[in-house]
Image (cartoon, rainbow, N blue to C red):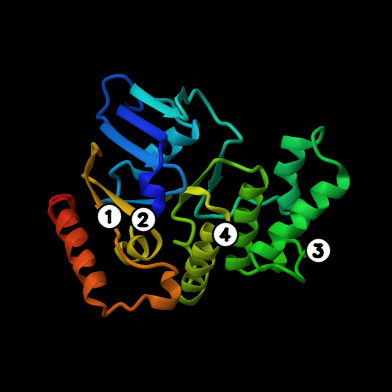
Amino acid sequence: MSSALHRAPIIVATNVGKAFSRGSQLAVTGVNLEIQAGEFLCIVGPSGCGKTTFLLMVAGVVALSYGRLAIEGATIQGPSRDRGLVFQESALFPWLSVRENIAFGLNLRSARQRSREEKEKLVADLIRLVGLQGFESHQPHELSGGMKQRTAIAGSLATEPKVLLMDEPFGALDAQSRGILQRELLRIHETSGRTTLFVTHDIREAILLSDRVAVMSARPGTIKSTVDIDLPRPRWQSFHEQDPKFLALERQLSALLDHDIRNNG
């Protein structure tokens, strides 16, 4: 079990709910969740259950209808550089190089605090961290899907966020690229210790990556259960899909999801 689970919470959701218009059905209701500093937490649930809506509320992009979301005790009132966001489709500037895309957020955050040399070193360190050496001058159209996502992750880390928020970042990739980036993300998490909230439909991906999995019910979504993932790290060396512990966790999570999935098509 990760030591992160014994630290103080960095994100706290208290009775969080969201309806997108007055009188409309709730998308999310009564969500109570604590995310510990340094923890990797995955959210799984049926399609349309509000996973992404909750993630965007944590990001400050979507406003709550009721309840409270706080980071380090302070109410979340909008977007902030203390929360980095990575989407399924990489949000890169097509006219900028890999190096320039990564540096963009860094320049916004710390133009006055860092020298040019310090910023260049940080960008170079991030390029090494995500394994893009040799592609620094490439533009997005010259990159594979996996390389674009590596660039997007590095760009989010450049702002030095306290929490990394990821909305199915590998969902559009082929199976081989997805597997490679899962292992890369595990390595980056182990290296940086960054608190990570990760939305996925894939139970096996959730087990491979996370310290805990939060299971959401069908819409209106709420957290129906959280499951500790008590598997040793680093998992890309010890992970085996036929391991009895892994299979038991997969059965447990599948059972939690099965009722809602059956009843929502």
Q: Is residue 233 visible?
A: yes
Give whichever of discs 1 and 3 has the lower sequence position.
Answer: 3
Report the Cα–Cα distance between label 3 and label 2: 36 Å
The residue type indicated by label 4 comes to Thr
Report the Cα–Cα distance between label 4 and label 2: 15 Å
Report the Cα–Cα distance between label 3 and label 4: 25 Å
Mark 3: few/some/many CA within 10 Å (<14, 14-19, 20+)? few
Q: Nearer the viewer, mark 3 or mark 4?
A: 4
Numbered disc total: 4
Task: Check residue 228 in the rendering and tell me which mark sits there, or answer none.
Answer: 1
- Mark 1–mark 2 CB contact (< 8 Å): yes
Q: Which residue is mark 3?
A: 137
Q: Which residue is mark 4?
A: 191
Mark 2: few/some/many CA within 10 Å (<14, 14-19, 20+)? many
Callout 3 secondary element: loop
Residue at (47, 66) in percent of width and height: 182
Report the Cα–Cα distance between label 1 and label 3: 42 Å
- Mark 4–mark 2 CB contact (< 8 Å): no
Residue 119, image x and y in percent? 80, 47
The residue type indicated by label 3 comes to Ser
Give whichever of discs 4 and 2 has the lower sequence position.
Answer: 4
* Drawn side of residue 14 relative to residue 95, left or right: left
The residue type indicated by label 1 comes to Asp
